[in-house]
Amino acid sequence: MRCFLGLVGGEDGATAVEYAVMLALILMVVIGSIGTLGNRTGGMWAGINSNLQSVGFIR
């Protein structure tokens, strides 16, 4: 309990919260970027697969 009260009353607690908020924002950006990149490359790979099937390379 003393440890928690020390974090709340001192400057270290504020710093920890700031780092947690920064980490959350960075994770949101990374997850959003991965989702967007996945959607775009998924269409690209589907097109490549279609082209390979049309020339008989893949059955």
Image (cartoon, rainbow, N blue to C red):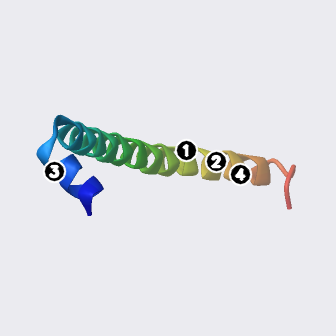
Q: Nearer the viewer, mark 4 or mark 3?
A: 3
Q: Which residue is mark 2?
A: 45
Q: Which residue is mark 4?
A: 49
Split into 4 quadrants, where in the image is the C terminus?
Answer: bottom right
Q: Is residue 53 left or right of residue 21?
A: right
Q: Counting residues from the N terminus, which is met first, the one under dot 4 or under dot 1?
A: 1
Q: Counting residues from the N terminus, which is met first, the one under dot 3 or under dot 2?
A: 3
Q: Nearer the viewer, mark 3 or mark 2?
A: 3
Q: Amino acid at mark 3?
A: Val
Q: Which residue is mark 1?
A: 41
Q: Counting residues from the N terminus, which is met first, the one under dot 3 or under dot 1?
A: 3
Q: Is residue 51 left or right of residue 36?
A: right
Q: Position of residue 49 (x, y in %)?
A: 71, 51
Cβ–Cβ below 8 Å for labels 2 and 1? yes
Which class describes the residues within 10 Å of circle 4: few (<14), some (14-19), or many (20+)?
Answer: few
Report the disc number at residue 8.
Answer: 3
